[in-house]
Amino acid sequence: MMKQYVFLTLFVLGMTTLNAQNGSTLQGETRRIPKEYLLTPYTIEVTFDKTVHLLFPEKVIYVDLGSNHIIAAKADGTENVIRVKAAVAYFQEETNFTVICDDGSFYSFNARYAGEPRMLNIDMRNSDINTHNRPSTVYLTELGKEPPKDVNRIMQDIYKADKKLVRHLGSKQQKIQFIVKGIFVSNGLFYFHTMTNNRSHVPFEVEYIKFKIADKKRAKRTPTQELAIEPVRILHEARQIKGKSKSRTVFALPKFTLTEDQVLIIELIEKNGGRHQNIQIESTDITHATQINPLKNK
């Protein structure tokens, strides 16, 4: 009986080892990931006494390091430059790190130690020239099912075209004019193209711009009758409009609807000033938003 027990134990241990070597366990069936599904990482050499800088095409929103042998962070005063260096001199094992940009591009790197790295300044903005090196796309939570690159492209196209499709939505006070030039829609997002015209000689400092849904009968409003809508993207956000100058901005907002008793209010508030602007947008303006197809501009 003892011999049978020992044999059974050795058999189980042997099968466990065999399955571990084959990349599977006894807990369930597994299969290998096809090679074409794998993302080939870039190779980066790092060292303890020098810093490697990577320039990305868009704002970096995520960095994850494989081990504490390396350190990485955004370069001071930048949004799209990452600096990487070794935290431990002469580490032996290769490690890795991952970078995601706000256009949804996903970059994977393997990092190994080198006394004198061959490349200290790397421009990743050219990584999509070769199809095989094109970064994968990540879908971001705030954009839902919209590819981030499509959202960025739409906003750039709206700003570049600079068309005035709406002529009745605006506010004017003390030589400050705030207007909505166009309202656009694509899949699950709205795009608002606004312009602020400072006709005075006094700079206009922007405290904030707020989008909110409110009842038309505002005299009886309560805090529960207003719903703030946070933009998920802002292109050319202005913090100051100098005297005798104009500034245009494109806002991307998540999908929303208005009842006949509601309006969308856009508030432009001046910092330490009183030249506040207020635009009320009816439900019919939202339903008549201009449709945009990002595929036409690819």
Image (tube, rainbow, N blue to C red):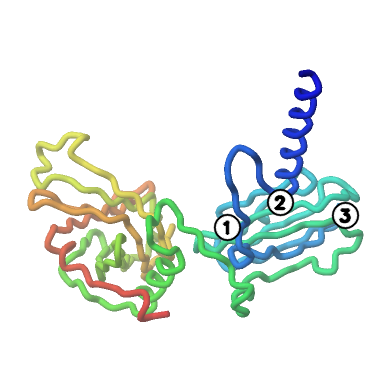
Q: Distance between the residues labelled 3 and 1?
A: 26 Å
Which amino acid, by three-letter code, is at mark 1?
Answer: Ile
**Which residue is at a point 34% across and 50% down the rendered structure image?**
230
Quadrant (top left, top right, bottom left, bottom right) of the C terminus: bottom left
Residue neighbourhood size for the residue with mark 2, other residues' Cα within 10 Å, grouped as few (<14), some (14–19), many (≥20): some
Q: Distance between the residues labelled 2 and 3?
A: 14 Å
Between 22 and 70, the residue placed more toward the observer is 22
Residue 281: where, in percent of width, then height? 17, 58
* Number of the label disc, if any, that sits on residue 100: 1
**Which residue is at a point 81% across and 53% down the rendered structure image?**
94
Secondary element at tag 3: loop
Which amino acid, by three-letter code, is at mark 2?
Answer: Ala
In the rendered image, which residue does mark 3 sit on?
49
Question: Which quarter of the picture shows residue 133?
Answer: bottom right
Between 271 and 234, the residue placed more toward the observer is 234
Left/right placement of residue 1 relative to residue 179 reads right
Question: Which quarter of the picture shows residue 144?
Answer: bottom left
Mark found first going from the N terminus, 2 or 1: 2
Quadrant (top left, top right, bottom left, bottom right) of the N terminus: top right
Mark found first going from the N terminus, 2 or 3: 3
Left/right placement of residue 20 relative to residue 200 reads right
**Which residue is at a point 90% across and 63% down the rendered structure image?**
116
In the rendered image, which residue does mark 2 sit on?
72
Between 173 and 115, the residue placed more toward the observer is 115
Q: State yes or no: discs 2 and 3 in contact (Cβ < 8 Å).
A: no
Residue 22: where, in percent of width, then height? 71, 50
Q: Which residue lies furthest to the top in this view?
A: 1
Question: Which quarter of the picture shows residue 206?
Answer: bottom left
Residue 29: where, in percent of width, then height? 58, 46
Mark found first going from the N terminus, 3 or 1: 3
